[in-house]
Amino acid sequence: MEPGPGAEPDLRAGLEAILLVVDEPVAEVTLAQVLERPVHEVGRAIRELSAEYTADGRGFDLREVAGGWRFYTRAECAPLVERFVRDGQQTRLTQAALETLAVVAYRQPVSRARVAAIRGVNSDGVMRTLMTRGLVEEAGTEPESQAVLYRTSSYFLERMGLRELGELPELAPFLPDDMESLEEQKQ
């Protein structure tokens, strides 16, 4: 029976949900505090989950390392994951990614909100993809709003065959002749 709205998930589901999003090992005591359960209960449940994943031959493993627990790719699946990541780096960018990358390249440093305003759609997922591929990186924060700012990376320059951003082509030849009327129509 699934919990109703507002009901707490069971201990095992809570552990899985938290461990799914961590990027470094989490101590049992921290998990116990977050889940508001005794440490010994959390420890027993997490060891049971780990043993279950191993017994089922899952593609992932729940390991205790560096004083905490975290999901890892099972060793025999590592070559598949490596191929997926490597191939993903070589796939072409989507139209949305190209548009977002262009906004960052020409307006940097720029916040996600500004990118979204220019494109007219939320670009958070696309920005994550561009960061994962190493084409975009953080460039500090905006003083007034404290929003994270982004810029293109040296890898972007390398992939584009540029020595510096000044070598980017001018945008004017690609813009419509009557930009003012386009801006007025948008408002």
Image: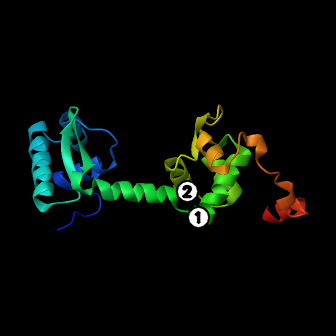
114, 85: nearer the viewer? 85
Q: How crowded is mark 2: few (under 14 residues within 10 Å), some or many (20 or more)?
A: some
Residue 74 in sight: no
- Coordinates of residue 77 in the picture (x, y in percent): 26, 57
Residue at 39% in and 59% down: 84
Locate residue 62 relative to residue 101 in the image: left or right: left
Residue type pointed to by label 1: Thr
Q: In which quarter of the image is the N terminus?
A: bottom left
Q: Name the residue under label 1.
A: 94
Image point 72% across, 39% down: which residue?
164
> Which quadrant, please, contains the C terminus?
bottom right
**Is residue 143 or residue 135 the one in the foreground?**
135
**Residue 70 vertical placement versus 2 (above, below):** above
Disc 2 versus disc 1: distance between alpha carbons? 9 Å
Compared with 185, 34 (above or below) is above
| Residue 116: image location, x then y, percent | 64, 55
Residue drawn 67% across and 61% down? Answer: 120
> Quadrant location of residue 52?
bottom left
Q: Residue at x 55, y 51 (%)?
A: 130
Q: Looking at the image, is mark 2 or mark 1 nearer the viewer?
A: 1
Query: Regarding mark 1 in the picture, which secondary structure is present there?
Result: loop
Q: Residues within 10 Å of mark 1 (few under 14, many from 20)?
A: few
**Earlier residue among tags 2 and 1:** 1
In the picture provided, is 93 more to the left or to the right than 21?
A: right
The image shows residue 103 at horizontal and vertical percentages of 69, 52
The disc placed on residue 74 is none
The residue pinned by badge 2 equals 126
In the rendered image, residue 156, in percent from the top left (x then y), is placed at 62, 46
Residue lying furthest bottom in this view? 1
Q: Is mark 2 on a helix, strand or loop?
A: helix
Report if the CB atoms under discs 2 and 1 are less than 8 Å apart. Answer: yes
